[in-house]
Amino acid sequence: MSHEPPLTAALLEAFVLCPMKFRLYRLGNAQSGVTRRVEGARALHAAVKHCLDECYRAGGPGGYPVQRLLEDFTRSFDGRACADSREEEEQRATGLRILAEYHADHLGDALCDLRVDVALEGPIDAWTWRAQADRREARPDGSVAYVMYSTARRPPSPGALAEDLRTGVLQLLAEGAEGRPVEVEVHALRSRRVLDATKRPDQLAALTQRLRETATSATALADPPALRGRHCRWCHARSICPQWSTR
Ligand code: SF4
C-alpha cells in the first residue's frame, strides 16, 4: 500500500485534463481561497449542502420546519463569491427554491437510520482512495443507500452515470466498508429528481479497470506536463503553475 496522499475521483478527473494539476492538487498546493466567476455556483452548493446536513442531522424534513431551512440558507449563503449582485440574487433565489422543493418532496419519507456527511477511505487495488457521501441511509426495506447532492444545472444522463468515477469510487469503497451491495443515488436538486447511480457488477469491474489504468499513469509520472487550456480558468493551482508563473 502506498504512503502517498489518497486518490479521489476528482483527482483523476484533474489528471485527465492536466497531469500537473493532478500533482499540485494531490500535494495540497492549490489555493482553495481563490475566487473566480464559477465560485458563485460553488457557494450555492456549499450553502444548500450545509442546510440539508443540518436538517438531516436533526432527523430529516419531517421534524424540521421549512422556514428554519430557509433561514439557515439565508444565513449561510456567501454571496461575495458571485461575480455581481445580479448573479448573487439569482443564486440566492435558486437556493431558496431548491430547499423549499426538497423539503416538500421528502417530507413523507420513511424514517430510517441516518448518517450525514460520510467520509470513506480504503483500498482499491494498490492505492488508497477517498470518497464522500452527503448521506448514508439504512432503509426500512433492509437496503443501504449512499446519497450525493447535485446542484448542477443539467443532471447527468443515465449513460454518464454508468461511467461516472465519483459515484463509482463511492460505491466501491462503501461496499468494501459494508461488506454487502449498496445503492448509490444522486439527488439532482434543481430538477427534483432522484437518479439511480448504482453500478452493476460488470460496470464496477470495468470502472475498477479504468481506475487502475489511470491511477498507474497518474502516479508514475516523475515530471508531469502542465497542459494549458480553457480548464486553466478554473484551476486553483494557477498561481504556482510553471505554465503561468513566467507570464
Ligand atoms: S493552470 Fe492549467 S496548466 Fe497549470 S496546473 Fe492548472 S490546469 Fe494545468
Image: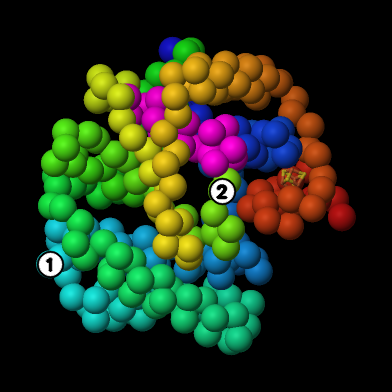
Q: Which residue is mark 1?
A: 63
Q: Are marks 2 and 1 in contact (CB under 8 Å)?
A: no
Label 2: few (<14), some (14–19) or many (≥20) C-alpha neighbours in 10 Å = some
* Left or right for 103, reference 88: left
In reply to whether residue 65 is colored magenta, the answer given is: no
In magenta, the rendered stretch is 158-175
Q: Is residue 57 visible?
A: no
Amino acid at circle 1: Gly
Please tell me which residue is depicted at 60% across the width and 21% down the height of the picture: 210
- Between marks 2 and 1 in the image, the one whose residue lies nearer the viewer: 2
Location of the N terminus by quadrant is top left
Q: Is residue 49 above or below residue 170?
A: below
Q: Is residue 83 above or below residue 182?
A: below
Q: Nearer the viewer, residue 121 or 242?
A: 121
Q: Quadrant of residue 213?
A: top right
Q: Which mark is residue 156?
A: 2
Q: Nearer the viewer, residue 175 or 21?
A: 175
Q: Is residue 49 above or below residue 30?
A: below
Q: Is mark 2 within 8 Å of ligand 1?
A: no
